[in-house]
Amino acid sequence: MSYKKSSELVQEICIIAETKSKTHWGRWTVMGFMAGAYVAFGAAVAIAVGKGITAPGWIGLSKFMFAAVFPVALILVIIGGAELFTGNCMVLPIGCFSKKTTWKLLFSNWIIVYIANFIGSIFIAWLIYKIGLFSSEPYTSSVIAIAQKKVSLNFTQAFLSGVGCNWLVALAVWLAVSADDISSKILAIWFPIMAFAAIGFEHSVANMFFIPLGIFHGSQLANWGNFFTSNLIPVTLGNIVGAFVFVGTAYFWVYKK
């Protein structure tokens, strides 16, 4: 399996960033909606597989199965082609550092794609709720418990968990770009995404699905207010730092400078 060396990747990502910066905002919106839906699909299949294992003493297997299928989200985004906010937190800063794009375009992309990701994710959460896919046990209590655990984090916990998460997600994107064929890209994506899901780090776009899904299913603790204040805002900030600082800035400084 052929691949690009890390020293070659910065230039490759600069080209990707330049292409993104020349894309019309309407395409950002459509592809952002698709990415939000893809992440929601990955999260939904993770619940369906992982939370179906309820036997006592099998919690480790349940967590692993949850994490093992979640990478379908980024596989769909990278190979299918879509605009994911958390991935762009690494790609576009490298483009700005190399002057292939501008900070103004970076912030425009982040805002439009973030909103589109939100709409796509919450649409799938609503769709699953209306269909009733998780309306029976053990799934109903599981989706409520997931949402409630996420809104119970304090600001520091949520922020730092967001840093760790998008450090791994950005590395998955980095490794996927390095691969030259689809099977290698899938393998490169799978390990880092599986790792963050198994650890339990916080991903802002995934939480745009998980928490509304719990709210739709009647969570008493999770509501629209603490969804934003206790989770989405600090996790988003952490996601930006994780990808921007620990992957984008670090690798650009090492290999481009």
Image (tube, helix red, strand yellow):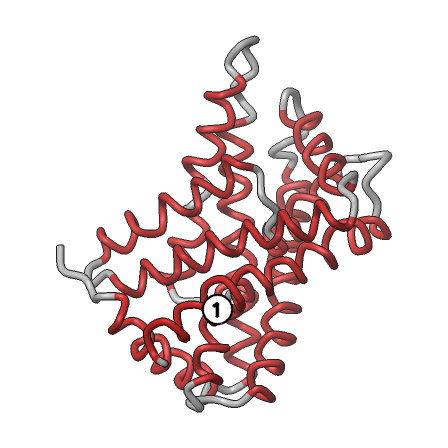
Which residue does the image show at 50% across and 23% down from the upper left? 62
Which residue does the image show at 47% across and 55% down from the upper left? 169
Q: How many numbered discs, if any?
A: 1
**At which x and y percent is residue 186?**
30, 51
Residue reaching furthest to the top: 56
- Left or right of 160? Residue 92 is left
- Left or right of 240? Residue 11 is left
Which one is in front, 42 or 187? Answer: 187
- Within the image, what quadrant is residue 114 found in? bottom right
- In the image, residue 142 sits, relative to residue 167, either above or below, namely above
Which residue does the image show at 26% across and 63% down from the upper left? 178
Q: Quadrant of the C terminus?
A: bottom left
- Give the amino acid type for the residue marked by disc 1 in the picture: Met
**At which x and y percent is residue 67?**
47, 36
Residue at disc 1, secondary structure: helix
- In the image, residue 202 sits, relative to residue 144, either above or below, namely below
Q: Quadrant of the N terminus?
A: bottom left
- In the image, residue 4 sits, relative to residue 160, either above or below, namely below
Disc 1 target residue: 90
Q: Residues within 10 Å of mark 1 (few under 14, many from 20)?
A: many
- Left or right of 254? Residue 90 is right
**At which x and y percent is residue 97?**
46, 84
- In the image, residue 197 sits, relative to residue 38, either above or below, namely above
Which residue does the image show at 39% across and 61% down from the upper left? 173
Residue reaching furthest to the left: 1
Which one is in front, 15 or 206? Answer: 15
- Left or right of 107? Residue 87 is left
**At which x and y percent is residue 105?**
56, 87
